[in-house]
Image: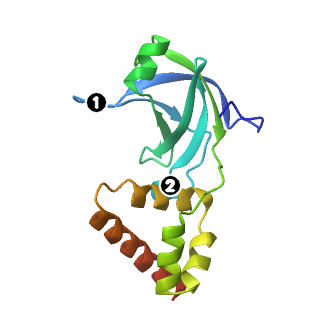
């Protein structure tokens, strides 16, 4: 996926910071973007570039103060030659991809209660994708089944 022709969420320089302590993440605070109240954990999915380095499928995550941050992986920092304390040019676009719902999940929801599919599609695209990713990153079938059951419970609560 190339850079989007949509309007950028941000296109400016940001100071790289680091969370204190061993293993603290390096990140850029992105105060211009509001948390997605409909997405799990209020994450906002984005793509774009950092100093010209292409980033795909990134997530802006909550700092806990109502603002979001973009974690900057070591591989990216190495590629652009920057660390905490350096300024970087970040361009971000919303990553509003269409969601492909696996047939298996559709069948499970329909089998349990035909209204669950309708409730699932009412969720934001970000939340739908988060749910699908969470289910299908399970390494064992039993874990995947447990996660599908948790999603069914979650959706049933929304119907009531």
Instruction: Please give left or right for residue 106 compared with residue 2 in the image.
Output: left
Q: Residue at x 46, y 14 (%)?
A: 79
**Residue 27: x percent and y percent?**
43, 30
The kind of secondary structure element at disc 1 is: loop
Q: Residue at x 78, y 35 (%)?
A: 5
Q: Is residue 31 above or below residue 88?
A: below
Q: Quadrant of the N terminus?
A: top right
Q: Residue at x 68, y 30 (%)?
A: 2
Q: Would residue 85 be visible to someone looking at this image?
A: no
Residue holding disc 2: 42
Disc 1/disc 2 C-alpha distance (Å): 23 Å
Which-is-in-front pick, marks 1 and 2? 2
* Residue 150 or residue 39, whichever sits in front: 150
Q: Residue at x 50, y 33 (%)?
A: 29
Instruction: Please give left or right for residue 158 compared with residue 9 in the image.
Output: left
Q: Is residue 156 above or below residue 69?
A: below
The kind of secondary structure element at disc 2 is: helix
Q: How many marks?
A: 2
Give the residue furthest to the top: 81
Residue holding disc 1: 20
**Residue 25: x percent and y percent?**
34, 31
**Colouring style:** rainbow
């Amino acid at each position: 996926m190339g850079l989007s022709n949509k309007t950028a969420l941000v296109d400016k320089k940001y100071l790289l910071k680091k969370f204190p302590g061993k293993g603290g993440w390096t990140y850029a605070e992105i105060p211009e973007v509001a948390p997605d109240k409909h997405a799990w954990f209020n994450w906002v999915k984005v793509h774009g570039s950092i100093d010209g380095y292409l980033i795909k499928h990134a997530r802006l995550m909550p700092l806990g103060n109502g603002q979001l941050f973009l974690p900057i992986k070591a591989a990216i920092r190495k590629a652009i030659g920057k660390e905490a304390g350096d300024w970087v040019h970040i361009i971000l676009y919303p990553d509003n991809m269409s969601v492909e719902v696996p047939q298996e999940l559709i069948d499970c929801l329909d089998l349990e209660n035909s209204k669950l599919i309708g409730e699932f599609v009412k969720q934001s695209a970000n939340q739908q994708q988060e749910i699908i990713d969470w289910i299908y990153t399970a390494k064992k079938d039993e874990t995947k089944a447990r996660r599908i059951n948790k999603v069914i419970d979650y959706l049933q609560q929304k119907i009531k």
